[in-house]
Structures are given as structure tokens and as C-alpha cells.
Image: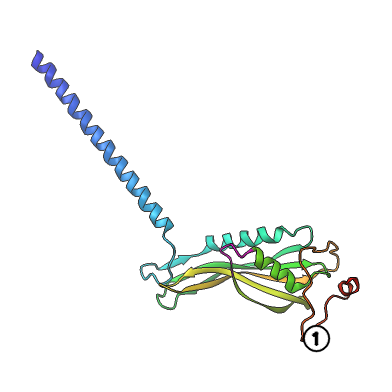
Amino acid sequence: MQDQHNSHQSNSGGVGIFILFIVILLLIAGAAGMFYGFLKQEKPKDLADTTVESFDLMEESKIAHRIVDDVLLAKRENWQLRDTERREHKDIQDTTGADIIWTDREVAVGVPVTTDLEGAARWVKEHLRDTDVKLIAEKESEWHDMDAYKLMLGIAVKSGKDSERKFLTDTIYFFHHGNLTNRDMDIPREPEPKDGRKGDPEEEKQQ
């Protein structure tokens, strides 16, 4: 009778140890899976990676849009913003043949007639300096037959050991909006350039 009791306890103990062993293995496997997923998620994209067939930069594009919006909305009392167009782009990486998908958009920004268009673009660039949004190009332009200044912004993605590729995500057109009256006190008028372009007449009268 005593032997049967001891045998029962031994069997129960063995089952308990086996269950505990299985639980420990499951916990280790789960932790390893989470760690692998974390590493996979944190690993930066590299367009030169030949093991990747498609690079999805949609989330990076959306983050860039939000960063630009946050900067522009800081001027909502002075400027009028209009998100005019948003498109999905698809390209092929030359070296690997992988697909690359991202989005870009156009934003029209009306500023007061007393605000220098290039000065407005400069203000935006300064406030994007410590972000991941990169300057791609800028130049004088037109928007709906009006003089404008175009700022082209985007994201940079690693492409090999010491290089990167930039993707255009935001094209901003700054133009003068006659109905806006709040002056931009923190955007100084630049001195008249040597090419003969004149500054704002109203501004010159006050100087």
C-alpha cells in the first residue's frame, strides 16, 4: 500500500516536472520569437539588400507628411494650407530589381503679401532641420499662374554601405494670398538681391 502511494507521488511529481519543462520551453520560444521580431522590425531598410523583393515605404512617407504638417500648422494663424494632391508611386531598384512603393503629395501654402515667399520656405526648412525630412530641391516656380516658391522634401533610405537614396514625399508651393492679413513677424524680409528684384513696396515704406 505504501509502495503504491509512493509510486503515485512519484508519477505526479514526474508529470508536474514535465509540464513545468514544457511551460519553460514555450516561454523561451515566445521570448525568442519576440526578440527576433524586434530585431527584424528595428533593422533599417537597405535598398541594396538582395534578399528583399519589395520595399514598402508607405509608413515612412506618412511619417514625413505628418512632420511637415506639424511644422506648417504652427503657422495656421498666418497661412492658409491646402493639401492638393496625394499619389502612390512605384519604382524599381536598379541594382536589385526590387519594387519600391511610397507616396507623395502637393501642398499649396498661401502666405500674406507682406511675407517673402523664399523666407517662408526658409522658415519651414529651419523647423525641419532636426527631423528625418530631407531637403531635395527648391526653386522659384508658379502656382495657378501666380508667382510661387517651391520646396521639395522627402525621405532618405539607405542604399548600400555609404550611400542613400532620397524619395520625394512633399512638394510645397508658397504663394501670396491677398485675403491673409496677419503678418509673419518671425520671417524677416531679406535685403534686396543684386539681380535687381524688388522687395515688397509696403515693407519698404515702413523701413
- Quickly name the residue at label 1: 196
Location of residue 113 by image quarter: bottom right
Query: Which amino acid lies under the numbered mark 1 shown in the image of this protein?
Result: Gly
Quarter of the figure with the C terminus? bottom right
The magenta segment is: 128-134
Label 1 neighbourhood size at 10 Å, few (<14), some (14-19), many (20+)? Answer: few
Taking the magenta stretch, the answer to whether it contains residue 131 is yes
Q: Is residue 168 left or right of residue 3?
A: right
- Would you say residue 158 is visible in this rendering? yes
In this view, 108 is above or below 36 = below
Quarter of the figure with the N terminus? top left
State the residue at coordinates (21%, 33%).
Answer: 18
In the orientation shown, which residue stands out farthest toward the right?
205
* Disc 1 secondary structure class: loop
Location of residue 155 by image quarter: bottom right
- In depth, the one of 104 and 165 nearer the eye is 165
State the residue at coordinates (72%, 79%).
Answer: 141
Taking the magenta stretch, the answer to whether it contains residue 100 is no
Residue 92 image offset from top left, x and y in percent:
46, 75
Q: Is residue 151 left or right of residue 167?
A: right
Location of residue 188 by image quarter: bottom right
- Would you say residue 85 is visible in this rendering? no
In the orientation shown, which residue stands out farthest toward the front?
207
Specify the color scheme: rainbow
Residue 85 image offset from top left, x and y in percent:
66, 67
Q: Is residue 43 left or right of residue 18?
A: right
State the residue at coordinates (84%, 61%).
Answer: 182
State the residue at coordinates (36%, 50%).
Answer: 35
